[in-house]
Image (cartoon, grey):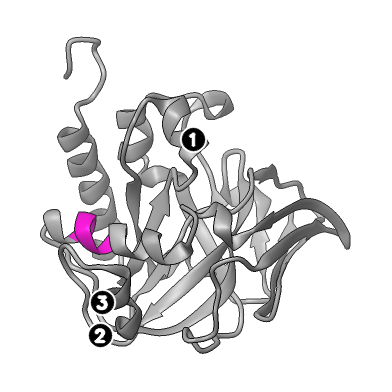
Amino acid sequence: MDPDGRLALDAAYAIQAASIRRRIARGERRIGVKMGFTSRAKMLQMGIDDLIWGRLTSGMAIEEGGSIAHSAYVHPRVEPELAFLLRRPLAGDVTAAEALPAVEAVAPALEIIDSRYRDFRFSLPAVIADNASSSGFVVGAWHSPYDDFSNLGMVMSIDGHAVQIGSSAAILGHPLRSLVAAARLSAAAGEPLQAGWTIMAGGATPAVWLKSGQHLSVEVERLGRAEFHVQS
């Protein structure tokens, strides 16, 4: 524990890794990484100068156009993102120019975040231990990564009504910077990014609460949409 009685960051990531090992022991597969705090404002709010990350497993993947059960979560929220699909491993300190050739495709995506902590109030180590709040994700159709995706309009809607409007540029100014950070941080943990993995780049707008009966979608300029339903 740190002097404030909170988990130190290394211990928090160790707890996160142990939690993921339990999921894998139950039959899930490791399939990627999610990035968190990709907004400069969020970094300042949390008093940090780097991103956080979590691990994705096959049990978190939700079929595009499919459904989730609200009762399977504590108090879920959703945020619009972009996702990367890797064609080859990517590890260590790389530049954006070096990272792009490792990308097979890019897609519109939605991430479901959930928290064990009341009202989503937590310390930095606490949220890291909780897998950076990552609980599920939906990915739309894949597209060429060589089409410019640096500043694409993004609209997240509930039941056909827009609730958040933003741009992919809100993800660190360019979503590729999130992939660069993912390569660095995961390699430092001894888990370099692998071919076939999905990398969730981080939220482009604030998250919104999910309720039973809703239909969620994100429409991304030139990339199309991703969507899912919420059952009770």
Q: Which residue is mark 3?
A: 98
Instruction: Tell me the residue at 32%/35% (across/down).
Output: 49
Label 2, residues with CA under 10 Å away: few <14, some 14-19, many ≥20: some
Report the span colored magenta. Answer: 182-186
Q: Which residue is mark 1?
A: 42
Front residue of 69 and 79: 79
Instruction: Tell me the residue at 54%/78% (across/down).
Output: 148
What element does badge 2 sit on? Answer: loop
Instruction: Tell me the residue at 16%/19% (across/down).
Output: 1
CA gap, disc 2 and disc 3: 12 Å
Question: Which secondary structure dominates the residues rendered in magenta?
Answer: helix
> Is there a contact, CB below 8 Å, between mark 2 and mark 1?
no
CA gap, disc 2 and disc 1: 31 Å
Q: Is residue 231 above or below residue 208?
A: below
Q: Which residue is mark 2?
A: 88
Mark 2 and mark 1 lie on one chain; the one further toward the N terminus is 1
